[in-house]
Amino acid sequence: MTITYKKSKAAVILKILVVASAVLVTGILISLLLYIIIKGIVNLQPSLFEWEYNSKNVSMMPAIINTLTMIGISVSVASILGVFSAIYLAEYAKRGSKLVKLIRMTTETLAGIPSIVFGLFGYLIFAYTFGFGYSMLGGAFTLALMILPLIIRTTEESLIAVPDLYREGSFGLGAGKLRTIFKIILPSASTGILAGIILGVGRVVGETAALLYTAGTVAGIPKSLMGSGRTLSVHMYALLSEGLYMGQAYATALVLLVMVVGINLLSSVLAGKFTYKEKKL
């Protein structure tokens, strides 16, 4: 007896719900983007991109420089620690061990902790205990801790997804464990690893709460990493809180949106190149 699911009432209702949900989410996204673009374009002015900030130009250029610096430091630290931790969990640790289960549970728990909690932790550890004060370095380390669980989990899943035939073939040709990991396993899992890193970048770009307690809100480019500075998201938050520069806040939101879209497009291009190389191999 065959059942025609397409003609059943439940299937029709579920299809309607799925289509309605997709249309609703797409509509909200498009309306949000249009609102930011329309409000932001009319308020974009050359003075917003001057090198130094003051109360007249309300320049966002220092915040852009600070954002790029924050991305570079935090993502570099988190990527190195996250990738090597994932390599240990996927390739060296005994599968099914209690230690691996504990680490996985811990990383999954940390990934769901609100950013304000990381901000308080970063303030107590880096700003107070280590004596960093409000500094770019303390903020970058705090953000690195925030995105570390994400990078660990995505990298580990990517490494596990690599077929064991690759490992066996490499060992059969006489390659060692370390050479197999760096020459065979990591290139094969590069697309998934890159996706996790890009997700971490997106979280760093849009983070505000954690940086208020660690990096501070100084509207300028610090002379060193131990100086305080605000990122684009913190800059926008400060403008909105003051209530005097609403137009400039919308322009900042537009620049932040363009930056996030640009990062996503760049990640898509890099992921496509890695995938193409894998197919050629």
Image (cartoon, rainbow, N blue to C red):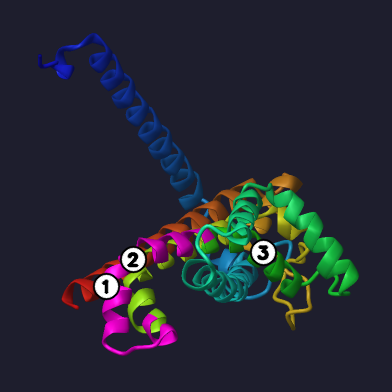
The residue located at (86%, 62%) in the rendering is 124
Q: What secondary structure characterizes most of the magenta part?
A: helix
Q: Which residues are magenta?
A: 153-180
The label nearer to you, 3 versus 1, is: 3
Q: Amino acid at mark 3?
A: Leu
Decide if residue 256 is in sight here. yes
Q: Amino acid at mark 2?
A: Val
Neighbourhood count class around disc 2 (C-alpha, 10 Å): few under 14, some 14–19, many 20 upward: some
Q: Position of residue 85 (x, y in %)?
A: 57, 71
The residue located at (54%, 69%) in the rendering is 93
The circle drawn on residue 145 is 3
Q: Can you name the residue that lies furthest to the left here?
A: 1
Q: Mark 1 or mark 3, which is nearer the start of the sequence?
A: 3
Work out how far the residue at label 1 is from the one at label 2, CA to CA, in angstroms.
Answer: 18 Å
In terms of depth relative to the viewer, which is nearer, 14 or 205? Answer: 14
The label nearer to you, 2 versus 3, is: 2
Q: Position of residue 104 (x, y in %)?
A: 58, 56
Q: Mark 2 or mark 1, which is nearer the start of the sequence?
A: 2
Q: Can you name the residue that lies furthest to the top here?
A: 9
Q: Secondary structure at mark 2?
A: loop
Quadrant of the image containing the C terminus: bottom left
